[in-house]
Amino acid sequence: MNLAESKVGVRAIYQPGASSIEGSPTALQMFHAHPPVMAMPHWHAQVEVNYVIRGSVHYRMSDHEFRLNAGEMCLFWGGQPHQMDESSDDSLYAGAHLPLVYFFRLRLPISISSRLMKGETLLTSATDAADIDNFARWFRYANSGNPAKSQHAVDELLLRIERIALEPYSMTSLAAINLDGDHPHSHSSRSVARMCDFIAANFLHDIDSVDIARAADLHPKYAMNLFKRSTGMTLSKYVTLLRLSRAQAMLMSEGANVLQVAMDSGFGSISAFNKSFRHIAGMSPSDFRRDIRLVTTVPAGAFRN
């Protein structure tokens, strides 16, 4: 298991790449902290669950926005650029970043998982005092250095996320949801998880759909169709997202060289890197590096509510 401490909350302004969220896209990370506003949108290759314990926060997503108040929880796919642009002075939140290999081991209805992967957000206020204690304990266990405690935290967290579908919740779209008989086939979920496992271990190398399908004992065409049906993404797009997430963090480093970042992130050429980065960020890697460094010179107070 790859567990790492998420360091959001250490600073008054969150900088993409300032934590290990983007730089370790295959790690399951838990957090329990004051959520700082984000200097600019970021993305990461994990599904994110946020539970607001105190105060309130506001998110801007690619095509919608929402506010979470104390006692509310959300679940969304971090592969879309998103930004927490408001965080009350007294806010405290907890949660985790779940790599897809964990997400597809969840027994969630397809009507939830597929819509999350397409960019919708799940919102619920069906929480209680036990969540406050549990999220705090899971964070302690995950960062205890004790493998048994870490695994226990993960197992309990995944069960808690599954329970979301059993209680009242809403999605950001008005589309109707039918939960009856809607659980994903266990064999298909296992196959997707196996593909995610292989990609997580090899995304920095030169891999293609044939390699990924072989690792899951599937025919390449079937593997590509299954992954697309389950995630809304092609296999190649997911591999690219992992590489871009890592590159985003590397560009934060002092003296980062764009060409070197492209190579170290698994891209075969600078042109492919520039094209992929521009597609998700809306700007070139060089412009992103320039803008994020300009942001670091802005006083923290400029981002306060």
Image (cartoon, grey):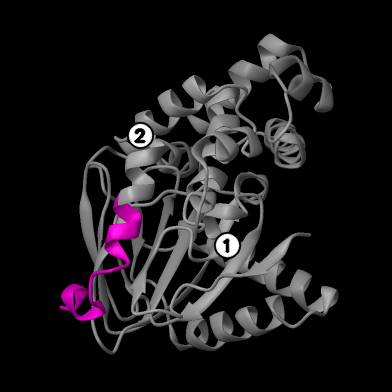
Q: Mark 2 or mark 1: which is in front?
A: 2
Name above or below for residue 111 compared with residue 74. above
Residue at figure coordinates x 69%, y 36% from the top left: 204
Check disc 2 and give the amino acid type: Ser
Q: Is residue 125 left or right of residue 225?
A: left
Q: How crowded is mark 1: few (under 14 residues within 10 Å), some or many (20 or more)?
A: some
Q: Is residue 104 left or right of residue 56?
A: right
Residue at figure coordinates x 29%, y 39% from the top left: 176
Name above or below for residue 51 compared with residue 28. below
Q: Name the residue under label 2.
A: 284
Residue at figure coordinates x 52%, y 43% from the top left: 257
Quarter of the image for residue 198 reads top right
Quarter of the rendering occupied by the N terminus = bottom right
Of residue 264 and residue 111, the one placed in the foreground of this image is 264
Majority SS type along the magenta span:
helix
Residue 62 location in percent, x, y? 26, 43
Look at the image and give the residue range highlighted in magenta: 291-305
